[in-house]
Image: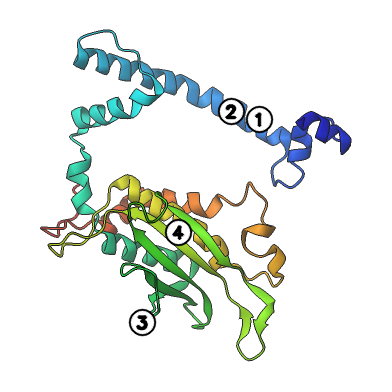
Amino acid sequence: LRIQKANILKYPTFADMAFVDKMATKKQVYAFLRRLRRESLPLARKEVQELRAFARERSGKEATIDHFDAAFWRERLLEDRFGLREDYIRPFFQFPVVLEALFALVHKLFGVDIKPEIGHQVWDEHVQTFRVRDSETGAMLGAFFLDAYRRRGKKKQGFWVQRIYDYSVALGVPREGPRLPAVHVVGDVQPPGADGKPAVMSMEQVAKLFHTFGGALRNLLCNQEEGLVSGTKGMEPDFQPLTPHLLERFAWDEHTIRSMSRHVQTGAVLPE
């Protein structure tokens, strides 16, 4: 059906049609995939063999690593080689501290200030409202709701962004200017305990939070005047993951990790 659709529109293949609204060309993508395979496949095979040998050593029998076993044995290997365990790392990443470091990074990269809005009506006691302003001019750029904590049976699991509305001049108010963008930023962090201690996060959750907020920035920092193509609606699909992956890479940066790691009991920074 895809080739028929492409042919009706006078394209030789579906790939030729699919790349019409992309930044990359079909030739560039195939060249990239060949290079990726050439450079990564030998290392991937070596790592699989290493994982199989470790599993064989631990289980005492020939081990076949299926895709659903890989994560388990990878965690065991990290524990064995480097002494890294999630229950050791998690207390170093308090949610409020991680959020503060994320906002500081966004300020440094994009020149914006993110401040909480007190007294705004929300649907849960843990939901926070933030406003985004230009650091130099103080001009309002947008706003977002942060619904970071897990609520089983009441909201979808995972980390994700939901657009509320995009920047638009036509839909603005004459005395107040254009309609500014607003989004929901949703997380899946275990809520703070009854003992008053702040919520803590795994490193995987930290990376997901950075990735998700990068997705929110696509809308919050957009000033395309025409609302019909504002935000992600007017972006090439292969450009849309840029800011999420950019911020996620920073989550694994040594300086960033040290700035947001503070043990929930001792206040110590994660050791090198």
Q: Which residue is labeled 4 in the image?
A: 213
Please state which of the two labelled residues, at mark 2 or mark 3, is closer to the viewer.
3
Location of residue 92 with respect to 110 vertically, above or below: above
Q: Position of residue 157 (x, y in %)?
A: 39, 49
Q: Name the spot of residue 260 as percent of width and height, x first.
A: 28, 58
Q: Which residue is drawn at 15% across and 56% down?
A: 268
Q: In this view, does 240 lie above or below 179?
A: above
Disc 1: which residue: 31
**Nearer to us: label 4 or label 1:** 4
- The residue singled out by tag 2 in the image is 35
Amino acid under disc 1:
Ala
- Image coordinates for residue 5, horizontal then vertical, percent: 81, 35
Q: Which residue is drawn at the image coordinates 42% and 18% (left, top)?
A: 45
The disc labelled 3 sits on which kind of residue? Gly
Q: Do the residues labelled 4 and 3 touch (CB within 8 Å)?
A: no
Dot 3 falls on a residue whose secondary structure is: loop
- Mark 2 and mark 1 in contact (Cβ < 8 Å)? yes
User: Which numbered disc flags the more N-terminal residue, 2 or 4?
Assistant: 2
Residue mark closest to the camera, 1 vs 3: 3
In space, the residues marked 2 and 4 are separated at their CA atoms by 30 Å
What residue is rendered at 27% in x and 52% in y? Answer: 201
Q: Name the residue under label 3.
A: 119
